[in-house]
Amino acid sequence: EESDEFPGLFDLVYGLFERENEEFEILVVANGTESFVMSRLNSSKSHLEKLKVIAFQKKVPQPVCLKAALGECSGTRMLSLGPFQELSAASYEKVIHSMTDAVEVVVPYRKQRKDAFLNRFHSKVLNKAVRWVLGVKLHDIGCNVRFFKREVLESIDLCGNMYRYFPALAAQKGFRVREIECDQAEKERKTRYYRIEQYLDRSIEILNLFFSTRFSKKPLRFFNLVGASLMVIGLLGLG
């Protein structure tokens, strides 16, 4: 996604890690947006020594982007972000400092959201569905900010748009996930409109989650369930 907020987010993250006095690198994945990304990065030339750009000519699924970044980076911890600022500057720092030896994934929870009702309603329905399917207590799956240890990503097989559910899948797999309350960025409070196709995509993703997590190890259970349901319907029809 092309966002004019990208240069500001880039500078914010650079300053955050520079203050930590640790070695770091910044990887930008241009997912079909190479010309846009390079034009915006020209305004941040002082940071280019820490920067590497991975470019895809055509748009690919998020897991492909993430795996490409994993192959290029050398760090043991990774902070993944979307193309625009979703949290306050102080909240990004809070996410970084919440990682400990006892935690493998840190995710934000924008509890006091002040954006449009439509955004909050869409988020609430999606998060409730994920909690029901996966049985994990996370409340802000839609936020793109995730801070995690390298081995977590290496251990989870993501496909399609399943990166959206990465923290929940990590928790279900036994990794220790910490959810922390964060402040929403002021600019992130505008209404985002979704096409009908996107709502259908979310529904399909939830069904995919349900099937892959409930029946992947014992697929016959699914077919037994379907067979039993059809038998009940047939008996009711005979009655």
Image (tube, rainbow, N blue to C red):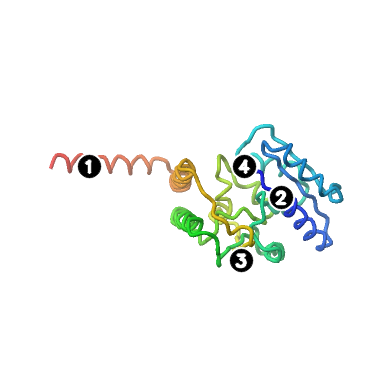
Q: Nearer the viewer, residue 188 or 203?
A: 188
Q: Which residue: 38% across, 42% down?
A: 222
Give the structural element (helix, strand or loop) at label 1: helix
The location of residue 152, given as percent across then percent down, is 64, 51
Q: Which comes sooner in the sequence, label 2 or label 3?
A: 2
Q: Give the mark toward the camera: 2 or 3.
A: 2
Residue 208 makes an appearance in the image: yes
Q: Is residue 3 above or below residue 178?
A: above
Q: Give the mark toward the camera: 2 or 1.
A: 2
Q: Is residue 100 above or below residue 56?
A: below
Q: Quadrant of the C terminus?
A: top left
In this figure, which residue is indicated by the disc labeled 4?
A: 63
Q: Nearer the viewer, residue 93 or 120?
A: 120
Q: Which residue: 67% across, 50% down?
A: 151
In this figure, which residue is indicated by the disc labeled 2?
A: 6
Within 10 Å of disc 1 (Cα), the crowding (few <14, some 14-19, many 20+) is few
Q: Which comes sooner in the sequence, label 2 or label 1?
A: 2
Give the Cα distance between marks 2 and 3. 24 Å
In this figure, which residue is indicated by the disc labeled 1?
A: 233
Give the structural element (helix, strand or loop) at label 4: helix
Q: Which residue: 77% across, 49% down?
A: 26
